[in-house]
Amino acid sequence: MTQSGQERAAFAAMHGPDLLYLRSSVLGRPMHRLLLVCGIPGAGKSTLAHRAVDRWDAVSFASETFAEALGAAARTASGDLSKEAIVHAYGAMAAAVADALSGHRLVIAVGSFRSEEQRRRFRDIGTSTGARVTTLRIVCPIEMAAQRVRPIRFKLAWSSVSIDPAVTSPVSAP
């Protein structure tokens, strides 16, 4: 086993494998990390991010959260984010990530990151602040992802519906 392999095994034995991500700070390397979590809607990106936040005291930002600020205008008729919403969401998330990297050891950016330009932009933000950047693509069968997304889209569709109480109140028989 190499020296670095021995150090890694000793660290894992002492602190547990879940803390290996902190190894870089113990060995004197940069402490800050940016994790880009990519994948199709419904793959489990947000679930992974929520667990990382709970387990490692990370801070997480999701493109969906920033897109929601635009309200119903953020979505196309099919329920997908509009091009304008994508530009807004990734721009706002980039600013939030850049700000968070100064005060947090682990920052997680969650989104589809469909274009290389989006991924490069976030990698550049991380490296410019001295953070180590890792891109993690969550893979899942399309059928499973579609089943996970369907209830979310249904909820979103109904959240914009308002019911007039005058129309739904019972009518007295003559």
Image (tube, grey):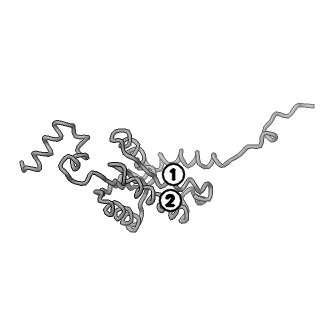
Q: Which label sits on residue 25? A: none
Residue at the image point whose x is 25% and y is 47% from the top: 21
> CA separation, marks 2 and 1?
8 Å
Residue at the image point whose x is 13% and y is 40% from the top: 10
Say above or below: 42 vs 11: below
Say above or below: 125 vs 37: below
Q: Which of 146 and 65 is in front in this view?
A: 65
Q: In terms of image quadrants, where is residue 38? A: bottom left
Disc 1 is placed on an element classified as helix
Q: Which residue lies furthest to the top in this view?
A: 173
Say above or below: 133 vs 15: below
Q: In terms of image quadrants, where is residue 74? A: bottom right
The tag earlier along the polypeptide, 2 or 1, is 1
Say whether marks 2 and 1 touch (CB < 8 Å): yes
Q: Which label sits on residue 65? A: 1
Amino acid type at image mark 1: Thr
Relative to 32, is 23 on the left or the right? Answer: left
Q: Which label sits on residue 89? A: 2
- Image spot of residue 169 (x, y percent): 80, 35
Disc 2 is placed on an element classified as helix
Residue at the image point whose x is 45% and y is 52% from the top: 62
- Image spot of residue 73 (x, y percent): 62, 59
Residue at the image point whose x is 43% and y is 57% from the top: 112
